[in-house]
Amino acid sequence: MSAFVIEKLCRGCQRCVRTCPNGAISMELSLAVVDSSKCLDCEECMEACTHRAIHFKRKKSKKKSPRIL
Ligand code: SF4
Ligand code: SF4
């Protein structure tokens, strides 16, 4: 799991860049980009982004088929 930016929502405010404790976010062409190799999954950038542009890739949970009793 690591943070990723939805480009069309990013406003380039750099709040996430200043918030990230591990320097995992940089700006490219006025958009935030996450280096997944540095991301600690702390979610601080997601909380800092007021434009809801940062989300997390989560593993899909395997849906269990309903048990028939
Ligand atoms: S805080 Fe959100 S809107 Fe601002 S640069 Fe980061 S991802 Fe983009
Ligand atoms: S989840 Fe944490 S370490 Fe990863 S990019 Fe966001 S603030 Fe940085």
Image: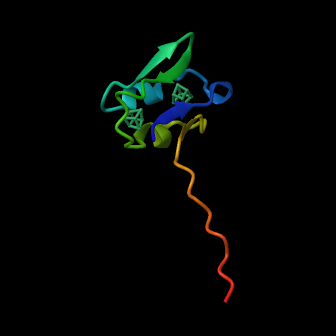
Query: Quick one: quadrant of the N terminus?
Result: top left
Q: Position of residue 65 (x, y in %)?
A: 66, 70
Query: Quick one: quadrant of the C terminus?
Result: bottom right
User: Is residue 67 depicted above or below 46 in this figure?
Assistant: below
Closer to the camera in the image, 26 or 48: 26
Quarter where residue 10 is shown: top right
Quarter where residue 7 is shown: top right
How many labels sit on residues?
A: 0
The structure residue drawn at horizontal position 61% and vertical position 68%, both measured from the top left corner, is: 64
Q: Position of residue 26 (x, y in %)?
A: 44, 18
The residue sitting at the top extreme is 29
The structure residue drawn at horizontal position 52% and vertical position 36%, both measured from the top left corner, is: 49
> On the rendering, which quadrant does ligand 2 occupy?
top left
Quarter where residue 6 is shown: top right
User: Is residue 37 depicted above or below 65 in this figure?
Assistant: above
User: Is residue 31 depicted above or below 67 in this figure?
Assistant: above
Q: Position of residue 22 (x, y in %)?
A: 30, 29
Report the side of 37 relative to 16 (left or right): left
The structure residue drawn at horizontal position 53% and vertical position 32%, both measured from the top left corner, is: 4
The residue sitting at the bottom extreme is 69
Report the side of 61 relative to 2 (left or right): right
Report the side of 59 relative to 7 (left or right): left
The structure residue drawn at horizontal position 53% and vertical position 41%, both measured from the top left corner, is: 57
